[in-house]
Image (cartoon, rainbow, N blue to C red):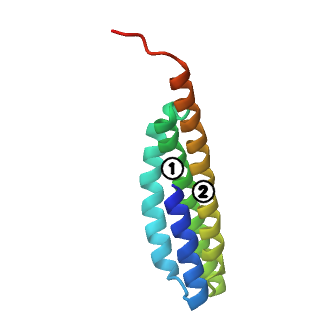
């Protein structure tokens, strides 16, 4: 998640620097297909959202993807309506922050689980 967040920020800065304009139709079509796929995953993972770090990571990634896909659809409408790339840049920044925040949550939980595991002696078999 952290690598994805950093990548999105880097690509966003690159597009800002070069002044590229995204294709609203392509954004909308891909955003809709991704939203439908991620909603299916979201439904499957709902019952496991409070699990260990691995399940929590899968849940957070899927949740962020659903939010991101919906935001991409809104950005596509914004790009179409304004003729500028600013709606896309705004959504990209939000998605990057979500990914980075999710990565921090999972890293903190993982470290807590590792500390707890070391504190609890494992019984010999």
Q: Position of residue 117 (x, y in %)?
A: 51, 24
Secondary structure under badge 2? helix
For image coordinates 50% across by 48% down, the residue present is 62
Q: Position of residue 69 (x, y in %)?
A: 53, 61
* Quadrant in which residue 41 is drawn: top left
Residue 11, placed above or below residue 54:
below
Residue 54, placed above or below residue 100:
above
According to the image, label 1 marks what residue? 61
Q: Position of residue 95 (x, y in %)?
A: 59, 62
Which class describes the residues within 10 Å of circle 1: few (<14), some (14-19), or many (20+)?
some
Can you tell which mark lies on residue 108?
A: none
The answer to whether 110 appears left or right of 41 in the picture is: right
| Mark nearer the N terminus (2 vs 1) | 1
For image coordinates 52% across by 31% down, the residue present is 114
For image coordinates 56% across by 37% down, the residue present is 111
* Quadrant in which residue 12 is drawn: bottom right
> Residue furthest toward the left?
125
Secondary structure under badge 1? helix
For image coordinates 49% across by 15% down, the residue present is 121
Q: Position of residue 119 (x, y in %)?
A: 56, 21
According to the image, label 2 marks what residue? 100
Cα distance, mark 2 to mark 1?
A: 11 Å
């Amino acid at each position: 998640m952290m690598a994805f967040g950093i990548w999105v920020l880097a690509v966003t800065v690159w597009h800002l620097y070069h002044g590229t304009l995204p294709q609203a139709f392509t954004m909308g079509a891909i955003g809709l297909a991704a939203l439908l796929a991620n909603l299916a995953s979201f439904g499957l993972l709902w019952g496991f959202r409070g699990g260990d770090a691995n399940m929590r990571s899968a849940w957070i990634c899927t949740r962020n993807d659903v939010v991101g896909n919906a935001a991409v659809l809104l950005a596509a409408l914004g790009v179409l309506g304004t003729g500028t790339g600013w709606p896309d840049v705004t959504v990209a920044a939000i998605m990057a922050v979500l990914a980075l925040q999710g990565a921090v949550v999972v890293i903190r939980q993982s470290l807590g689980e590792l500390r707890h595991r070391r504190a609890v002696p494992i019984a010999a078999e």
